[in-house]
Image (spheres, rainbow, N blue to C red):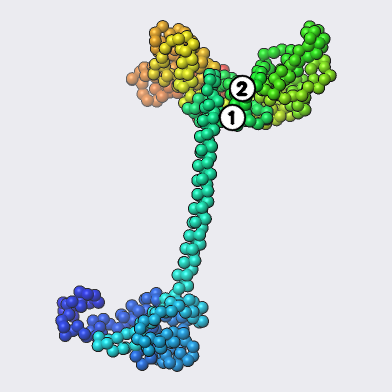
Amino acid sequence: MGNIEYKLNSKVTSTLNEDNHNKSLDNFVDLNIVKMMLNSSYDGLTYTNEDGIIVFNNAAYCKITGINNEQIIGKSIYDLAQDGFPISQMVLGVFNTKETLSEVIRYKNSDKEVLVTIVPLFNSEGIFKGIVGNIRDLTSLNALRKELSLINAKYSEEKQKQKIINEELQKQLEKNERLAERINELLIGFEDFEFSAFSKHSRDLAELAYRISHVNSTILITGESGVGKDVFCRMVHKFYNNAKPYYKISCGAIPENLMESELFGYEPGAFTGASKSGKKGIFEVAQDGIVFLDEVGELSLPLQVKLLTVLQDRKFYRLGGTREIKMEARIISATNRNLKDDVAKGRFRGDLYYRLNVIPVYIPPLRERKEDIIHLASSYLNRLNQKNNTNIKMSFEVQKILLKYNWPGNIRELNNIIERMYVFNTGGVIDVENLPYELFKIIEEEEDILKIDHKSNLKSAMEIIEAKLILRHLEQEYTLQEIADQLGINISTLERKLLKYNLPRRYKRNI
């Protein structure tokens, strides 16, 4: 073909001279290639010549319509129209009007809905040369349209659901904000508030205290000694009604023979030494206020029975009395013991435990909410400054040491240490030299690590650090199992290391 490219595009057309411009494409493209191209189309294609004879159908046409070539090739559209072939009627219409026509029809042979477009053909001289029919299967398209409609409907539904969820979430956020504002208002002037808003634990506890203050259910507060169980109870009382009576009684500090009369009261002459006028018990004088039973796990079994009866019947009698007295006070109990274990060992009544534990409240130790340490220490120091008209500060180095200490005595220990450093401070700033031994020891341990002989290899240096770390844990009041858990090792590994470093086994008793 010389310099003429074997392509059907505008560049080929532009390279042809005027004599070749009107020549048939047969001079450039093999007709078999054209047929292959037409048969590769996803749309059905059919050609009817100017005499109305069907000359060509591609493969897609037969597949879409379900009509074989043997049925229609070489046949007249006039005859086919009489036989009811739907496309023949359209072709006759185009033969008459010489204008493009499109319709959606359904072929009985394939039961498919198709879009048929009939296009008249004219040669370069404007002479009519028949028609080309384009057959497009709408079945998959309609299925896709339905699927898209369902997706859109589902999307709209989910969007509406999300809108409702967002609105509810916004309402809840606004409600929480109002609740937080209300709690802050109620806590104004509550100087002993030891649950700062700095930690999630503390925020949750303050909100819990507010919520349970509005329900008349028994509450059992658990947690280590010094975490602030009494403070939590007084916070519930403040949220409930600060004007109502509040009585706290330590069940472990009063002898058993006096505890009953303290709780229930007694009539004149009820026992030797009893007041001639009798005495009201705490349950009676508390009226509709709050009675806080601290260290409730220390109650004797006989008193546990009587307390259970009061909680169940909401009534009681004074010692030596016959007049029934209605129990109106709310009962809040607290313990640092594991009452479940005590129940299992028969030291505490199971029925009383479940009666007290309607609303369980666990107050985490200070080591689990270290983000509160500096805030609590600063708050207590400010309280001491206000009380004594001073302006003593706390150095940054001391604050870092406070964060490193494990605080086995929790908030009570923290307040004691802050007060001790405050009292013995001679300047305007509490510094490292004011630290008590248990905290100053942290600095010594860190310095010991830094003073490891530089000639030591890495293995021996790491063993020194490991031994010091284990020894530090052994100084705390924990079992070997608890120490192993804190170190992230199993107890057998801990025991091997104790032997290796010749360390004491002071807490093996509870492993």
Question: Residue 349: which disc?
Answer: none
Residue found at the far front of this picture:
243
Tell me, yes or no, if residue 222 can be seen here: no
How many other residues sit within 10 Å of disc 1, few (<14), some (14-19) or many (≥20)?
Answer: many
Q: Is residue 435 left or right of residue 264?
A: left
Q: Which dot, 1 or 2, sits closer to the camera? A: 2
At label 2, the amino acid type is: Asn
Residue of label 1? 210
Which quadrant of the structure image shows residue 352?
top right
Whole-angstrom CA distance, mark 1 to mark 2, is 13 Å
Q: In terms of sequence position, does the residue under pointer 1 or pointer 2 come before the other?
A: 1
Q: In this view, does 511 lie above or below 48?
A: above
Residue under the point 37% across and 76% down: 41
In depth, the one of 178 and 477 nearer the eye is: 178
Residue found at the far right of this picture:
322
Which quadrant of the structure image shows residue 355?
top right
In depth, the one of 289 and 62 nearer the eye is: 289
In depth, the one of 434 and 163 nearer the eye is: 163
Residue of label 2? 242
Residue 206, position as x, y percentages in the image = 55, 28
**Which quarter of the figure is the N terminus placed in?**
bottom left
Q: In this view, does 337 lie to the left or right of 53?
A: right
Considering the numbered disc 1 on the image, is that residue within a helix, a strand or a loop? helix
At label 1, the amino acid type is: Tyr
Whether residues under marks 1 and 2 lie with C-beta atoms below 8 angstroms apart, the answer is no
Q: Number of marks in the image?
A: 2
Tell me, yes or no, if residue 158 can be seen here: yes
How many other residues sit within 10 Å of disc 2, few (<14), some (14-19) or many (≥20)?
Answer: some
Considering the numbered disc 2 on the image, is that residue within a helix, a strand or a loop? loop
Residue under the point 57% across and 26% down: 363
Residue 365, position as x, y percentages in the image = 54, 24
Q: Is residue 222 above or below residue 72?
A: above
